[in-house]
Image (cartoon, grey):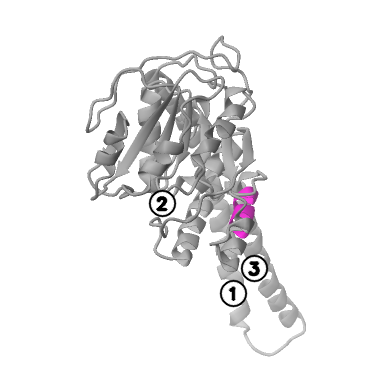
Amino acid sequence: MNEEETLPDVLATIPRSIPGVDEIEILVIDDGSTDRTVEVARRLGVRHIVRHTRNMGLARSFRDGVDYALRHGADVVVNTDGDNQYPQDRIGDLVMPVVLGDADIVIADRQTATIEHFSPLKKLLQQVGSAVVNFAAGTDLPDAASGFRAYSRGALLRLNVVTQFSYCMETIIQAGHKRMRIVSVPVTTNPKTRESRLFSSMWQHIAKSGQAISRSYVMFRPHTVFVTLGLLFALGAVLPFGRYAVLLATGTAGQHLQSIVLGATSLVGALLSFALLVLADLQRTNRVLLEETLERLKEVQYGTTTGPAAVDGAGGRPASGHLPGTAARTAQPAAAQARPAEPGLADVPAAVQ
């Protein structure tokens, strides 16, 4: 959105060739720009542009970019930002583990502790946020918030972004619970060009990120959440009921209604927690079945790839008969967009938001 000043630097540093990759195509996602972002992209030779008539947000831009790339037969999708924060000349390093079949997702580690324009508080919050995401996902990533990533086609077919804020945390938690292989590659970021437009303040970012992490964690780990709540409420019921029994046995004067009310309330909370656990477990089963169905529908919609990075997310097997590292492409119909795409979108589009 409104990246006419930095977009030339981003496009100029995207590599035009990567070992093991037939072609590289650049896809620009314009999220409701009011400046000359689209004109600049076309002037610089970008053939593939997805346009939003108004600002839709980062998560929707990512989904639409992935949809466009998969429709056109992409085997690997690399995502970078339009503000030139990330070093696009490292795209080859991000792609290589996917091309070789060693990873489903590769995430750049910005080494946030070394970024000069990050305040000490922001550095601390980045570390805490990554730790929380790693706990929720069962992963060990140093920079979970990094948006500079490479995805295999198989991984993108299995991931489903439902948040409206940022896909970064949610996709890691999904990938972790779906047993995808995630690799981290250290990079050095470019100098800061502007303030973030994703959030108005650091605290808004924390609140929205926390909401997305919590939703994803409950979605994939309902037993942990509701069993813990149920046990806490049960303990909250045992203590006041025990107190009431002791007072009654010792003949202490008074009705001690406060113990009865508190115990009864906690007992209701425990019963509700276990009831919600049953419902969440049923929903989890339905979600798994729906995701498997959606994955099959995506395979039908986008076609079967034969490219180098089409690796099965669970077992590391090539999705076709080709060995990892060989190159082949599939041609897909053009997606509906503001400007018709020319045929033959390549294996590795770099999505610039």
Which residue is rendered at x = 61% and y = 45% of the image? 137
Image height check: is 58 above or below 314? below
Q: Amino acid at mark 3?
A: Ala
**Quick one: quadrant of the C terminus?**
top left
Measure the alpha-carbon separation of dots 3 and 1: 7 Å
Q: Nearer the viewer, residue 8 or 348?
A: 8
N-term-proximal mark, 3 vs 1: 3
Numbered badge on residue 237: 3
What secondary structure is marked by label 3? helix
Residue that numbered label 2 is attached to: 165
Residue 324 x, y percent position in the rendering: 60, 17
Q: Amino acid at mark 1?
A: Leu
Which residue is rendered at x = 63% and y = 78% of the image? 259
Q: Nearer the viewer, residue 184 or 207?
A: 184
N-term-proximal mark, 2 vs 1: 2
Residue range in magenta is 127-135
- Magenta highlight on residue 323: no
Are the residues at dot 3 and dot 1 in contact (C-beta closer than 8 Å)? no
Residue 154 x, y percent position in the rendering: 51, 25
Residue that numbered label 1 is attached to: 262
What secondary structure is marked by label 1? helix
